[in-house]
Image (tube, grey):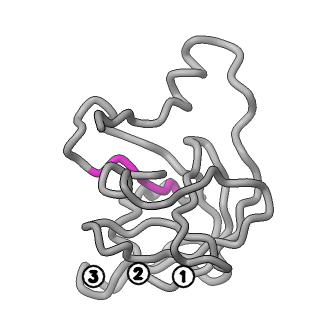
Amino acid sequence: MCDYSLQNVKSRPAQVGDKLETRNFGTGTTGFCDAADRDVAVCLLPGTEIAFDEPARKHPFNEAKTFDKVAIFRQFHKEDLHRHHDFLEFASGEVEMLTLLAIGQRATVLQLPATPKTDAEREEQRRAEYAG
């Protein structure tokens, strides 16, 4: 994370132990902010593992659905600059777009992805790039 609609929001990279909160940044997307500084988007690398304080929930206007507490951050559709890229893959195998989650949910960064050693691993961890 940080999805295309957060490119103009103050942000920082995630660190192990970070306390996060889902937030609507007023830019057309929901993402993670620093729970202590809600104006800062926290950008996750693909492969980052997080744990929600309670089972994760979709935003009520989407559908009433809950997920596991543990998820891995993924990015899809990186080549399409005008699509949301940020997803969570839950322990159950379910994958959900981050922007569809309910706001105000708290989570902790459990671990960051390992340092890539091959080109394939580097590509897997590459975040979508945005022309600015």
Q: Is residue 8 left or right of residue 113?
A: left
- Point out the stretch of residues depicted in magenta: 84-89
Whether 51 is drawn above or below 14: the answer is: below
Q: Is residue 63 left or right of residue 123?
A: left
SS at circle 2: loop
Across and down, in percent, residue 108 comes to 71, 69
Q: Are marks 1 and 2 in contact (CB under 8 Å)?
A: yes
The residue identified by callout 1 is 105
SS at circle 1: loop
**Along the line of sight, which residue is nearer the eye, 35 or 122?**
35
Residue under the point 55% across and 16% down = 120
Tell me where residue 130 sits by quadrant. Answer: top left
Across and down, in percent, residue 68 comes to 57, 71
Tell me where residue 61 sits by quadrant. Answer: bottom left
Q: CA distance from mark 2 to mark 3?
A: 10 Å
Mark number displayed over residue 63? 3
